[in-house]
Amino acid sequence: MAKLVVLYKTPKDTAAFDRYYSSTHIPLARKIPGLRSYDISEGAVAAPAGPSGVHLVATLTFASMEDLQKGLASPEGQTAAGDLANFADGGADLLMFETRDA
């Protein structure tokens, strides 16, 4: 399996971010070819020391890193990636990695 984790930093207007993310970005991202599952954090994203500065965490799962990369390179993946500029004014970190059972 391979995962794409997106750490959305706290935006200027959290309510506007949440509305846009739910109504526009999620439907775009769900169209990425090869996407197996997609989940997002609910409630505050905390760090052991307290507030994290992260508003929302999204985890997208693919069968392999190859599928993840193909999905992101597809027109649907490019549309979803391009959409970040429309709502993620706090910034976002994207992390990609393969997983294994531990």
Image: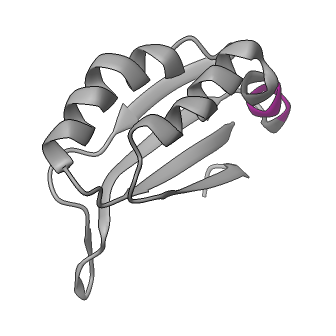
Q: Which residues are magenta?
A: 66-70
- Residue 60, percent from left and from top: 53, 34
Residue visible at 78% across and 18% down in the picture: 74
Q: Quadrant of residue 68?
A: top right
Q: Nearer the viewer, residue 48 or 102?
A: 48
Residue visible at 26% across and 40% down in the picture: 17
Count the marks: 0
Q: Main secondary structure of the magenta part?
A: helix
- Residue 61, percent from left and from top: 58, 32
Looking at the figure, which quarter contains the N terminus? top right
Residue visible at 63% across and 55% down in the picture: 95
- Residue 68 is a magenta residue: yes
- Residue 81 is a magenta residue: no
- Residue 5, percent from left and from top: 54, 48
Residue visible at 66% across and 15% down in the picture: 76
Q: Nearer the viewer, residue 85 or 66?
A: 85
Viewed as shown, does residue 92 lie left or right of 52?
Answer: right
Classify 13 as above or below 38: below
Classify 36 as above or below 40: above
Looking at the figure, which quarter contains the C terminus? bottom right
Q: Quadrant of residue 90?
A: bottom left
Viewed as shown, does residue 23 lie left or right of 66?
Answer: left
Render colour scheme: one colour
- Residue 39, percent from left and from top: 38, 33
Q: Nearer the viewer, residue 51 or 80?
A: 80
Q: Residue furthest bottom?
A: 49
